[in-house]
Amino acid sequence: MRVNIKRKANNSPDIIHGDYPYLHPHFFKLINMPGKLLIRCCFTLIAATCTLFFSACKNKNDDSANDAAGSNSPRINAITFLHDGKFNEAEIAFKKAIKTDPDNILNYVDLSLIYLNKNKFDEVEKEVQAGLKIQPKNTDLMQILAASYIKQDNKDAAQKQLNQILSVDGKNIAAYYMLSTLAKNSLDVAAQQYNLLKILEVNPSNIAVRMQLTELLAAQGKTDSSLYYLQSIKKIAPEFSELAAAPYKEAVALLQKDQPEKAAYYIQQFHKVMEVSRIYATSMAEIEPLALPEVNADFNDSRFTQADYKNNSTSWHNIRFTDVSQTLGITTPGISNSTRSVLALVDDDGTGNMYIYSSFGVPGSTSTHFLFKRDFGNFTEVPSTAGVDLKTEELAAVFADYDNDGYQDLFISTTKGIVLFQNRGDGNFSRVRKDIGLSEISDGSKLLTADFDQDGDLDLYVGCASTNKFFRNNGDGTFSEQAGAMNLALTAGAKDMDFGDWDLDGDLDIAMVTTNGSVQLMNNDRHSKFSNYTDSVKLSAYKGNAIAFADYNNDGMPDLFVGGIKGGNSFLFKNTGKNGYVVDAASQVFSDVLKNINISGVTFIDFDNDGHEDILVAGTTADGSKGLQLFHNDTTKGFSNASGMLPETATQGLHTAIADLNLDGDDDIFMAGPAGLYIIRNDGGNSSHYMQVQLTGLSYGNNKNNRLGIGAQVELKAGDLYQLKTIKRALTNFGIGVRDSFDAVRIIWPNGMPQYISDPSRKQKFIEQEKLKGSCPFLYAWNGEKYVFVKDMMWRSALGMPLAINGKDTTYAFSDASKEYLLIPGENLKPKNGKYSIKITEELWEAVYFDKAELIAVDHPDSVDVFADERFTPPPFAGKKLYSVAGKYYPLKATDGNGDDVLDKIKAYDFQYISNFGMGKFQGLAEDHDLVLDLGDKASGNNLHLFLRGWIFPADASINTSMAQADTYRQKPPSLQVIDKDGKWKTVIPNIGFPMGKDKMVIVDLSNKFLTPNDRRVRIQTNMQIYWDEIFFSSSLSKAPVNMHDLTMTSASLGYRGYSSTYTKGGPYGPHWFDYYNVSNGQKWRDLSGNYTRYGDVLPLLKQADDEYIICNSGDEISIDFDASGLPALPKGWKRDFLIYSEGWVKDGDLNTAYGQTVEPLPFHAMPAYPYTGEINYPFNQHKTYMQQYNTRKVSTDKFKTALNSGNKAGLK
């Protein structure tokens, strides 16, 4: 058998390449596949002959189905023939399989593929139609028929068939990809682009599609869009190799220079290098025709098909676990009678390509360790020359991507300290020998990695025999030990730990059993502080050896299981929320079985995919009886012992881990025991339906969450079933039993950002959405026809936002109320029934304290433009000042720091932005970049002003927290330089300010700033993510008359509205814009809890700034009308613009914002700082009547916590 190993360009309509067909769907992925993945899929078929169709027989009631799945069944014979390359024999065997088991749809699929390869198109049609009679909406068969039409050059029929697939399954990305390929071959660029974009709607993390879009858009000369997709690949993919980084950098530079023709060559070179990467191969496998997710099931041919079940239940009793250790190449020679082991496991990309690290020994002796890697199906032992080589006693190990480069690094705790091996991404590890802050500890027996301070990177908590250690990840490759400062040192160390959000407040808490056996719960108070909640949640009376978090009763509250000390009881604790944990009566079942086992580990595992968490317990026994125990969760009947389905070859366990080894939808067991390492495969757990969830956090230019989303909370709603799981690995399975569809998924990322997906697909990759969670309220105005978004407002307030952290001291943003005047162009505000009507909405994760509003009409000659200075500056703020411009001049030249011309980007107010700078590590942080403007001879006089219109993508409180932990990352506000007498650049304005949000004007007074008489160049330097639109200057401000008229506010009411749909204004580098008339409802954010202003009339609260303000929640809207009747008529040749004044505060719900969980403490004008302390308080007595009359609407987080669990799917986006 010979197939093309290297992927070739898909330049023809044929979807088959190679001398032999891809007969079984496993073979479909052999086509166009890089070598590693190809060999792996070949192994898939080899291993599959052992246990194929185990779960297929579970879906049938009749005996013939069971016979058909037997060891000598025609189907297994057919699969064996496929493996041997005997395709004619396979054809005959599949025909027999159909006769034996006529209802098994997979036989029709595979036989149709054989005929497709042989170009027997009539036979293809016959078998497809026969299969469709059994399952009329089987999209696998429809795809085969479409492929047949393509091979027959019947494009119309193929398109019709593919569109029929999409009418059945609107998220079928293989169909979209086939349509995009047809369009490409027909030179239909628009259709090709449309179908590629449809794929990204379903699977936004697919870099192969993003690569194709990059090429396609560059060929069309759409440089901004091409650049956007090219840079997005860097956000998603692991860190590039040097070979890929070089053409990528050249392509980016040329696109930024607006030279797409030259960039195309480097884009293609980058594409070629990426084609051989694992992430690219995975992306192609997701979209190529009939590349069904199940084809990677190495050992099990059962699938999540559109099966018509004859019954509505599956039996977990038919499931078995098989020891496949030796079959897969796992051997640990010389290991016996170990009393100490280490086990670490990672599948870093959700494709089954794993690393397993284990070691064995007895206390006081050097450990024998093994590192196994899986790329081609079997595991191979990685030699010590690959970098991992220790000769010491090992206590614990864990894989974690500490530097967020997309490759999982290996931490090993030894009696000589913690050793870190950095994963280089090429199959090798290198030991980090420099001091990175992992202090020398000799007794760390448990390693826990997650983002415990909500700053976007993974920290390391070490359970020690003495005092626990907490190593905060500083984000620059170093760690700082903070256990004492964070209240995590404890008086007793920990022998086992787990993390979860026990109180559903959005941060990760830690449960542990200490070295003396006591159970402890450490509550995350945020701001790098934990509190011991053990007593308050009623856990102090219990002891154990091992502990784990999970929601076993599907009520949305993380419960606890504690494996007891030998001779003692084990406990299943139900989380009751405010009333703490209570012991479930099912605990007796565990105690009866486990009392004589020396328990060393407990794990929740839904082994039968019924949607309810089962429990796996690992331990050893003195008499050699089974120490590995499995308990099934029936939910109605309780827990029962299911250990009989475990293999007799693996009875004693020291450590266990779970992962979906063969990507077949059920979790398998990995165990390190006294006699070595075991892999115990789950056979039949996937007979129930399931969803596979994989998260991708954005890195480059974002870094708000770790790449794998470790610590995220994922909720799934499927009919009457609700589940909550904490992400702790790359791929997480959600079983749903016999239910055949998914309603919705909600992800709560580690930084607290919620993400909603309705009608998700079975194998779902979720990419972090690049959206603001906090900013400011939105201003809409009536333009004579409709309400339009104008600007965001109250940008000068960021209550509780940390700016710098120095030890225990934190510097927060200034506490002054935002006082700002914003310009509303006259065309955006017209009278409506004699009133000027505006809407102010709160749509982000914030609480707003709105104290005063004013509207001023600004009348002036239409030969003059007026502007307000809308830049962010610290207090004191500028008052009501307008800048009138009659002579508006654009620079003669505008270049970036490389000398590239950007003048066209700034010569018009058109929402086309200068974007030719690289992103930095974080959102809001870019690479250092310059903008050089030559103003020319007209820039003269002592009244010279520079006007810069643009927008900013800001950092947030958590990003500030992360940046403050190291000196590597600092924001540099825009500075302005001019040429001095020596011909050198000299800073004359250290901080010119930056736009206060979206579409804002920054006005810089350049009077007397030039240091030479004839050189009118200015250079603006920054590393902030600022996008400039229009830039001009005026040599003298106009003295034309400007008449201002204060308008009377006639009404103001507060009510609930919801959330506007968003889009990007002006292209991929434009700001988010909002459609007032496309609104969604529901519980979008985790609200700040407390008392908000009741709905209704709020006019008295906006008339003066008196600390009696409207308190708005997310989703609220303030509707304000101003009397237009008293304004004078405009003289001929005049126009009317407006100023809106607002005063108040904004506090967002970021996990690192001070008091970001509550409305209180309330701000007030006289407060010296926020948060305030000591005797300082809001003057409640003075404002008692106001509080009682207005602030009576109580808001809690309950609706957010139960948004999916309650069955309310409104507003899930």
Image (cartoon, rainbow, N blue to C red):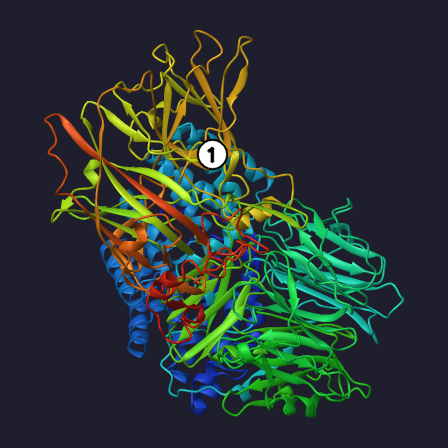
Q: Left or right: 215 with respect to 459? A: left
SS at badge 1: helix
Q: How many marks?
A: 1
Q: Tell me if residue 820 can be seen.
A: yes
Is residue 986 shown above or below 1103?
above
Image coordinates of residue 924 in percent, x first then y, are 49, 41
Q: Residue furthest front?
A: 1182
Q: Quadrant of residue 586?
A: bottom right
- Say few, some or many: other residues with alpha carbon within 10 Å of mark 1 (under 14 / 14 to 19 / 20 or more): many
709 over 563 or under it: above or below = above
Q: Is residue 381 left or right of residue 144?
A: right
Residue 63 is drawn in which quadrant? bottom left
The C terminus - image quarter: bottom left
The amino acid on which the numbered mark 1 sits, given as a three-letter code, is Val
137 shown above or below 311: above
* Front one among 232 and 356: 232
Q: Pick whichever, 1152 or 716, lies toward us.
A: 1152
Can residue 31 be seen here?
A: no
- Residue 1030, position as x, y percentages in the image: 33, 28
Q: Residue 570's quadrant in the figure? A: bottom right
Residue 539 left/right relative to 338: left
Residue at x 54% of width, y 54% of height: 1176
The percent position of residue 1162, horizontal first and vertical second, equals: 46, 56
Residue at mark 1: 252
Q: Is residue 414 left or right of residue 534?
A: right
Where's residue 1118, x and y in %? 28, 55
